[in-house]
Image (tube, helix red, strand yellow):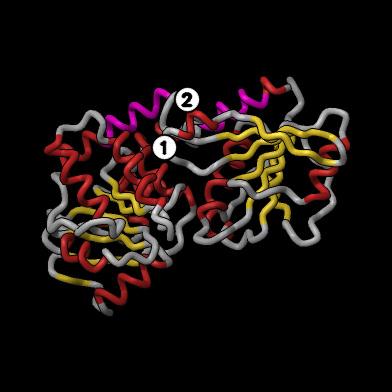
Amino acid sequence: MPARRLWDVFCQVIDNHGDLGVAWRLCADLAARGERVRLWVDDAAALAWMAPQGHAGVTIVAWTDPAPDLVPGDVVVETFGCDPPPRFVRHMAGRESPPPWINLEYLSAEAYVERSHGLPSPVGVLGRLLTKHFFYPGFTAGSAGLLREPGLLAERQAFDRDGWLHALGLTLHPGERLVSLFCYANPALAAMLDVLTVTPTLLLVTQGAAATQTRALLGPALRRGALRAHMLPYLPQSGYDRLLWACELNFVRGEDSFVRAQWAGRPFVWQIYPQQDGAHRVKLLAFLDRLLVDADEAVAGPLRSVWLGWNALAALPATLPACGPWRSLCEAWRNRLLEQPDLTTQLLGFVEKMR
């Protein structure tokens, strides 16, 4: 058997744990496929609840200043444009054959992804020219695809919803739907809670901004009309996946939960990370255009309105789209995504070709 490669994956935690969430899923997936991984991260605190058991084959390197003086491994991956430490890059340049250098970019449905995926970027170091390659996740055959572990869909099919709820001490009332809430601070949450009160709903609320806002809006009783809320503990990534599988509707945010909601195949509403220049609107509409490309207007119109309203880009409608057609659309979308090779498989193939 060929020797296992050593990957150096770099991650800087900007905010909200999303960068670390994506980086950890990649590292764990690589290790599960027989690779060795060093995850360089400047703040690993969230891994205590995100991945409390760690993963065999993944070592955490504290990315301090100055950074540890380690010899580069066989592949270097920087997540979201966080440049590796200068001394580490100089070590790369000093090798007879520098390791492949990948910049794993942010996920987008915009057209530039296909144009930019795989492009080289020359970097001058110590009088030598290194090459960094851009690696773009995406939703089309011209992109790197999405992170998806080989056994994910089998786990999804074998999931015991009732057993999972029982382990959390939760029991659904007759006729009650289950909804998850994971969001940034959101000015539309008060109106959305009103929408959710129309139908008997158990709202499972994640820690962070979602819990803080929900407590403030619902008060100590955590109830309003036919809505009752339950505050979840911090969930490991595997537990969050199961939350998405359990619910009839999922409110998600950022990148990692957004992708996992798509693999769940359940109706979801995405809160994109808001940007001051308004660029998030373009990104949101680009994804909606792909998601709804084949949908009847009777389905697409209400869904688009809810997504825009949830992102404070339009008024939030008073009702949610019908669950049946919405779920069928999400299942069809998941099946379309399953036709693409997953991101880790494509990354392994890309690196192999570079060798």
Is label 2 in a helix, a strand or a loop?
Answer: loop
* Nearest-to-viewer mark from 1 and 2: 1
Q: Amino acid at mark 1?
A: Glu
Magenta span contains residue 339: yes
Left or right of residue 158: residue 172: left
Residue at coordinates 43% horizontally, 52% vertically from top-left?
254
**What segment carries the magenta color?**
330-351
* Percent of width and height locating residue 12: 63, 55
Query: Which quadrant, please, contains the C terminus?
Result: top right
Query: Which quadrant, please, contains the N terminus?
Result: top right
Magenta span contains residue 328: no
Crowding at mark 2 (Cα within 10 Å: few <14, some 14-19, many 20+) = some
Which residue is label 2 attached to?
142
Which residue is label 1 attached to?
110
**Front in this rendered view, residue 71 or 143:** 143
* Percent of width and height locating residue 123: 74, 38
Task: Name the disc covering residue 98, or none.
Answer: none
Residue at coordinates 82% horizontally, 41% vertically from top-left?
125
Q: Amino acid at mark 2?
A: Gly
